[in-house]
Amino acid sequence: QVQLVQSGAEVKKPGASVKVSCKASGYTFTSYYMHWVRQAPGQGLEWMGIINPSGGSTSYAQKLQGRVTMTRDTSTSTVYMELSSLRSEDTAVYYCARVWRDGYPKGAFDIWGQGTMVTVSS
Amino acid sequence: EIVLTQSPGTLSLSPGERATLSCRASQSVSSSYLAWYQQKPGQAPRLLIYGASSRATGIPDRFSGSGSGTDFTLTISRLEPEDFAVYYCQQYGSSPVTFGQGTKVEIK
């Protein structure tokens, strides 16, 4: 079945970096754009950016520009999200989410990963 | 950036009642690129509605979406026990993608 499986929880110190993976299965990986969304404890959803798994092009939320990098490995059907210079405000659950319509960057998110908790604490 | 404002913040209802959730955009949402998600504690969001009014695969027909331009509504015709959750609207027609702050539907 179609699914996205993310890497496990991380605890990082302020100033460090974290890299979260999201492995896709059950569909043609390169045909569907992927987004990253995060959710701070008890808060709403915040869009982080999008990656085209086919060509690797990306677009990031302005507030994260310079700190976030999204990449993909087509050989393993995995997308990655790396966030650097971590601060306490980055403590959140990080989700990858697939756009429902193949070949289109604009679309609702029909498949979500299970989420990865990233805790930033000294 | 399109700001989405959801109301009310919390809706207290009983099973079997009708729920009406509102999502208002700060500017017109292009091509009705508006979605609704349900999220339960400890779970990822689940897509309910896309294109303002189309139900996602496997979503019961008690969920319906309507609206266009800047005003959108999610209606749950008769609340089932499993429908008590937080609901988010999202616009994906303009960059950046944005979400509303959420409406919690709780048991009265």
Image: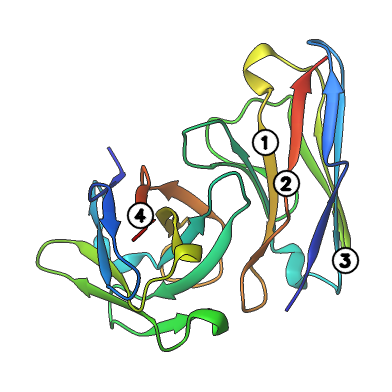
Determine whether label 3 and label 4 are within 8 Å by CB: no
Find residue B49 and report its horizontal and vertical position in percent: 66, 44
What's the CA distance linking mark 3 and mark 4?
37 Å
The residue sitting at 87% across, 66% down in the picture is B69
Residue A11 visible at all:
yes
The chain identifier of the residue carrying mark 3 reads B
Along the horizontal axis of the image, is A4 left or right of B17? left
Q: Secondary structure at mark 2?
A: loop
The chain identifier of the residue carrying mark 1 reads B
For marks 2 and 3, give the one nearer the viewer. 2
Find residue A20 and report its horizontal and vertical position in percent: 27, 61
Residue ranking furthest to the front:
A122
Along the horizontal axis of the image, is A13 left or right of B58? left
Q: Look at mark 2 in the image and give the residue it sits on.
A: B102
Q: Quadrant of residue B31?
A: bottom right
The chain identifier of the residue carrying mark 4 reads A
Q: Amino acid at mark 4?
A: Val
Find residue A101 and report its horizontal and vertical position in percent: 48, 60
What's the CA distance linking mark 2 and mark 1?
6 Å
Q: Look at mark 4 in the image and give the residue it sits on.
A: A118
For marks 3 and 4, give the one nearer the viewer. 4
Above or below, B34 against A117 in this view is below
